[in-house]
Image (cartoon, rainbow, N blue to C red):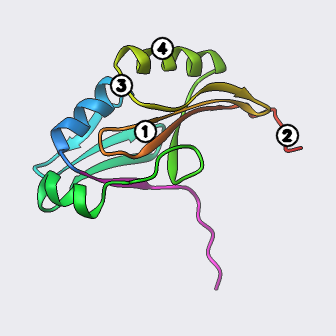
Amino acid sequence: MAFTVSGINHFGLSVADLDDSIKFYTEILGLKISEKREHDCFFSVGDSSVFALLQYPGGSDKFDTEMRPTRKGKAFTHFGFAAPSIEDVFEFQGLLEEKNIEITKKAYERWDGASVYFTDPNGYTIEFIYFDPTSHAK
């Protein structure tokens, strides 16, 4: 029997310092905490998705030696949060610059919308992307 995936239920990241990561995701991306426990934190995203931060066992030192990404930027593993418009992508870059957040690829317009890439405190690359639903693959 074949099954069809109907969406992403949740996405979880191991983090070096849970409190620092919560601060980043609430202050920079404006995510709202839906549940916080001792070693993890959950954010509701959109209508039915959940984003989770999970304290890496052994703390920051173990995270740095065992998990911290060593390659950054658009060509490598990343995940994206949806932006409401092209203008918001460019305005968000201003916030990143103001907060001295590392930008790995500056905001740019593309045939299907706009993107900016940056890193979180754990070294993960994140894309803030507006995807134009009326665009068509060329």
> Which residue carries the number 1 mark?
45
Q: Residue at x 38, y 54 (%)?
A: 69
> Which residue carries the number 4 mark?
94
**Do the residues bearing badges 3 and 4 touch, measured as CB atoms within 8 Å?**
no
Q: Which mark is residue 1?
A: none
Q: Tell me which numbered mark, 2 or 3, is placed earlier along the sequence.
A: 3
Residue 95 placement, left or right of 4:
left
Residue 117 placement, left or right of 64:
right
SS of the residue under disc 4:
helix
**Do the residues bearing badges 4 and 2 touch, measured as CB atoms within 8 Å?**
no
- In the image, the segment drawn in magenta is 1-15
Q: What is the three-letter code of the residue carrying label 1?
A: Val
Q: What is the three-letter code of the residue carrying label 4?
A: Gly
Q: Residue at x 16, y 38 (%)?
A: 19
Asked if 116 appears above or below 43 in the picture, the reply is above
Nearest-to-viewer mark from 3 and 4: 4
Asked if 51 appears above or below 117 in the picture, the reply is below
Query: Horizontal and vertical percent for residue 80?
Result: 53, 41
> Which residue carries the number 2 mark?
136
Q: Residue at x 43, y 38 (%)?
A: 45
Q: Residue at x 29, y 31 (%)?
A: 24
Whether 5 is among the magenta residues is: yes
Whole-angstrom CA distance, mark 3 to mark 4, is 11 Å
Query: Horizontal and vertical percent for residue 41?
Result: 23, 45
